[in-house]
Amino acid sequence: MGIPLASEARLASLQGRIPTIATLCSHSSLQIFHGARVEGFPTLGLCVGPPPKFYDAFPLARPDQFLSVPTVKDLPGATQRLRDAGAIIVPHGSFVEYLGPEAFSAMDVPVFGNRAVLGWESDRRKERDWLESAGVRMPKLYEDPNEITGPVIVKYYGAKGGKGFFLAKNREALADFRPTGPYVIQEYVLGTRYYMHFFYSPIADGGYRLRHGALELLGMDRRDEANIDELYKLGAQEELIRAGIRPTFVVTGNVPVILRESLLPRAFEIAAKIIDRSVELFGGMVGPFCLEGIMTEDFEFKVFEISSRIVAGTNLFISGSPYSDLVAPGLSTGRRIAREVAQARAQNRLAEVLS
Ligand code: AMP
């Protein structure tokens, strides 16, 4: 037996029944419902107001039932109804963001993965402590602007979708910067971005083994970010900034990518170190997570962010990816989540994958 994350009381609503996979109708919910259905689970869509009409367009991903609340903030009030339905909630980025990490964490319903990770991921300082203590390279943080030696990115706290980031190509260019709130100055890493979709199972006994359980790579994407990604079409950035046009990093979509095969061992080593450290710090980051970073020309991967749950870039791979097809054909991250629930249930180990 591994590390139990959920108490017996938390899992009482699942006793002796097939669980229902539930999530908020947004983000990667179509994939989560589709994967659950393929693995034989009933599904429940949590929606704000009437069920979203566009779900009718995707019959294989439409949940069996909906539970509607007036606003997202009313979801904690639906706890009893979720327990009565035998629900397991699958968190995704929008779910946690709309509800807030504290309210999400406080819900007394079984949640897929370890809810303790929220406290580490939502606080940028704690996240950095976790990753750096795991031995992972991150972009340098400058406490003193006089120490700046290259390009930097200035990030306001809580800046959503990179809105309000400020780029400066050197210390002198930062002289124009007039802060409008609390911020950090980070090294701007030159290289190419990769968003790697991993899955950590504490109960798997084959595959890429870790100290506890095993690690899988299920896909990889790059985010399309407006307006930065196509800004070059309009001219040099300095010129644009002088004209009052500022770069923004708002995610509008995703494109599939793969990594040079010779770099895969490095990607696995980094992910493994992060998982091993998460086990020591808070019992483990169970299930899907995404390493978001930049590969430099010297093949150093610097991680600027970690998402500790299913990311929207996995929506590219609902019928499998070049990586997941080598684990099991047609394996999406949503389906992998459902499979983990099925396997944990069969082995009587749900407490290790739910919290
Ligand atoms: P974040 O909000 O931290 O996920 O960053 C949003 C976007 O800004 C990323 O997807 C990258 O395109 C870019 N970015 C963030 N941090 C860095 C960095 N240290 N160096 C280069 N680009 C970065």
Image (spheres, grey):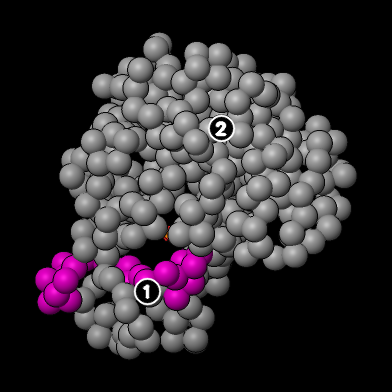
- Res 182 → quadrant: bottom left
Q: Is residue 221 above or below residue 243?
A: above
x and y percent of residue 293 in the render? 36, 47
Number of other residues with Cα within 10 Å of mark 2, as a class: few under 14, some 14 to 19, many 20 or more: few
Which disc, if any, is residue 212? none
Of the numbered discs 2 and 1, the one sitting upstream in the chain is: 2
Which residue shows up at 39% across the image and 58% down it?
A: 122
Viewer-nearest residue: 335 or 251: 335
x and y percent of residue 264 in the render? 36, 27
Cβ atoms under marks 2 and 1 closer than 8 Å: no
* Tag 1 residue: 156
Classify residue 274 as left or right of residue 4: left
Q: Amino acid at mark 1?
A: Tyr
* Tag 2 residue: 12
Q: Amino acid at mark 2?
A: Ala
Magenta segment: does it hold 352? no
Viewer-nearest residue: 8 or 196: 8
Q: Is residue 216 above or below residue 241?
A: above
* Circle 1 SS class: strand
x and y percent of residue 209 in the render? 33, 17
Classify residue 38 as left or right of residue 14: right
* Circle 2 SS class: helix
Q: Is residue 298 above or below residue 237?
A: above
Number of other residues with Cα within 10 Å of mark 1, as a class: few under 14, some 14 to 19, many 20 or more: some
Q: Quadrant of the N terminus?
A: top left
- Does the residue tagged 2 have its C-beta within 8 Å of any atom of ligand 1? no
Viewer-nearest residue: 10 or 121: 10
Magenta range: 142-164
x and y percent of residue 305 in the render? 37, 52
Q: Quadrant of ligand 1?
A: bottom left
Query: How far apart in space, not on screen, are marks 2 and 1 (Cα)?
Result: 43 Å
**Which residue is the extreme one toward the left?**
147
